[in-house]
Image (cartoon, grey):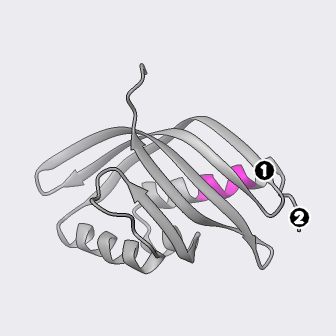
Amino acid sequence: MTTPQPAAVEAAAAAIVDAFAATDTERYFDAFAPDATFVFHTEPARLDSRAAYEHLWAEWLESGWRVLSCASSDNRVQVFDGGGIFTHTVDTTVSTADGAESYRERETIVFALQHGRLVAVHEHLSPFTGTP
């Protein structure tokens, strides 16, 4: 196995944040493995595949949802043989049918090297309960 450089993990995470901020469906989901799992505090159950999340995303888009802004801060990267973990605080504002909504959350993204590329295999969002 190969241990990726921290900068490579950070770049892979930045690509996900940038694609999310642009509501760029294709680029966003291309960063995740097909068998990636997702745990979002806003959803009642774990999403057990990229396809399950893509389905949910499509429903959001159909309802008028889109990302207005997404900013990452307080980043930390940990690397290990075959992958890395990226944690950060993320401030997001989305547009919905009911107007704009803003969130501050903590996020963990786990990356694995697959075919020479870092892809996300797990994403976990939790509400930020600390002091800004």
Give whichever of 22, 65 is nearer the camera: 65
According to the image, label 2 marks what residue?
A: 2
Helix, strand or loop at label 2? It is loop
Residue 5 within the segment the image draws in magenta:
no
The amino acid at mark 2 is Thr
Q: Is residue 10 visible?
A: yes
Sequence-earlier tag: 2 or 1: 2
How many numbered marks, from 0 up?
2
Residue 13 within the segment the image draws in magenta:
yes
> Residue 12 lies in what quarter of the image?
bottom right
Q: Residues within 10 Å of mark 2 (few under 14, many from 20)?
A: few
* Residue 81 in the figure: left or right of residue 42: right
Residue 119, position as x, y percentages in the image: 65, 68
Residue 47, position as x, y percentages in the image: 40, 69
In this view, the residue farthest toward the top is 131
According to the image, label 1 marks what residue?
A: 79
Which residue is painted at 84% across and 52% down in the image?
5
Residue 46, position as x, y percentages in the image: 38, 64
* Residue 119 in the figure: left or right of residue 32: right
Magenta region, mostly helix, strand or loop?
helix
* Residue 34 in the figure: left or right of residue 39: right
* Residue 107 in the figure: left or right of residue 8: left
The amino acid at mark 1 is Val
> Residue 33 lies in what quarter of the image?
bottom right
Helix, strand or loop at label 1? It is strand
Task: Please identify the quadrant where the N terminus is shown.
Answer: bottom right
Which residue is painted at 39% across and 63% down in the image?
23
Which residue is painted at 20% across and 45% down in the image?
100
> Residue 54 lies in what quarter of the image?
bottom left
